[in-house]
Image (cartoon, helix red, strand yellow):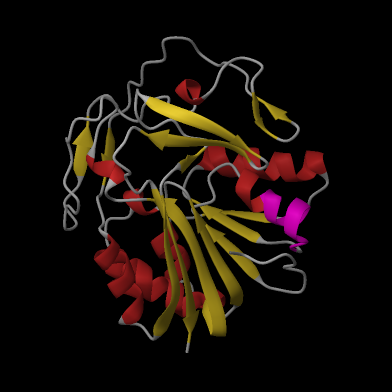
Amino acid sequence: MLGPDLSGLNICHLQCNAGQDTLSLVSRLKAQNPIGVDISDVAIDFATKLSEQSGMKATFIRSDVFDFFDDVQWHNQFDLVFVSYGALNWLSDIKRWGRGVSNILKLGGRLCLIEFHPTMSMFNYDMVRDYPYSSNGVAMSEPSGVSDYVGRSGKEGEDLMPDLKFKAGVQDFRNTSPSHEFCWGLADVINSLLTTGVQLTELKEYPYSNFCKTYATMREEKVEEGTRWYPEEPMLPMMFSIQATKH
């Protein structure tokens, strides 16, 4: 989706979390000093240290994504805007997000988004339908916060991807911080872009989840890139990707 060689492009990774995906653009696709943006001080501190320790150059900015969009210094600056895994569910206003993506892209610049599918997100860990397909901008609050989905997606010493083994973390993790997330359907996401002059060029859906065991009963498949998790039959879309270009 991103292409084999990103050298020479101005790249922004929105809601980059702790920076691993951002730095993979450098190590695997030859990106040069991409910019990663996230609201978390802890995540940005970790990402900055990881960049320094690994010798892979990237710039990490601590900012609310909407504040980043509003900062005119970033308008019309990027050849590529990248969004990856578990980002859209934290957005309170998907239309503002679409306008912001358009603002920071250069003419001819493209958006590459890979995200968990809204249909997948309708079901809880026990695969009981518990959430709406789209919450229309209404926050879905969870007192127990975000679960340890990473911890339940692997076993100690298991190969997650080439040169990376799973290491168990905190056992019996309990989150004491409530979370407030949003459900956005495919139409919500796509229309937020189409109304800004960003043209959709590709939409794909995937019947598996990369590295993330979303439901209690799933089968895993080892591929060259790592682990894919499939739900029980019948097939359910687990992820989707979008490519779009600013005109």
* Along the viewing direction, whichever of 104 and 236 lies nearer the viewer: 236
| Residue occupying the point 53% across, 42% down | 41
* Along the viewing direction, whichever of 225 and 114 lies nearer the viewer: 225
Q: Quadrant of residue 65?
A: bottom left
| x, y percent for residue 12 | 59, 64
Looking at the rendering, the stretch of residues picked out in magenta corresponds to 23-31
Looking at the image, the residue that sits furthest to the front is 233
| x, y percent for residue 200 | 41, 77
| Residue occupying the point 52% across, 78% down | 105
* Residue 193 vertical position relative to residue 13 in the rendered view, above or below: below
| x, y percent for residue 122 | 23, 42
| x, y percent for residue 197 | 39, 86
Q: How many marks?
A: 0
Answer whether residue 26 is magenta in the image. yes
* Residue 68 vertical position relative to residue 61 in the rendered view, above or below: below
Q: Quadrant of residue 160?
A: top right
Q: Quadrant of residue 78?
A: bottom right
Q: Is residue 75 visible?
A: no
Q: Quadrant of the N terminus?
A: bottom right
Most prominent secondary structure in the magenta stretch?
Answer: helix
| Residue occupying the point 69% across, 50% down | 24
| Residue occupying the point 49% across, 22% down | 151
Answer whether residue 186 is magenta in the image. no
Q: Is residue 97 visible?
A: yes
* Along the viewing direction, whichever of 126 and 105 lies nearer the viewer: 126
* Along the viewing direction, whichever of 30 and 104 lies nearer the viewer: 30
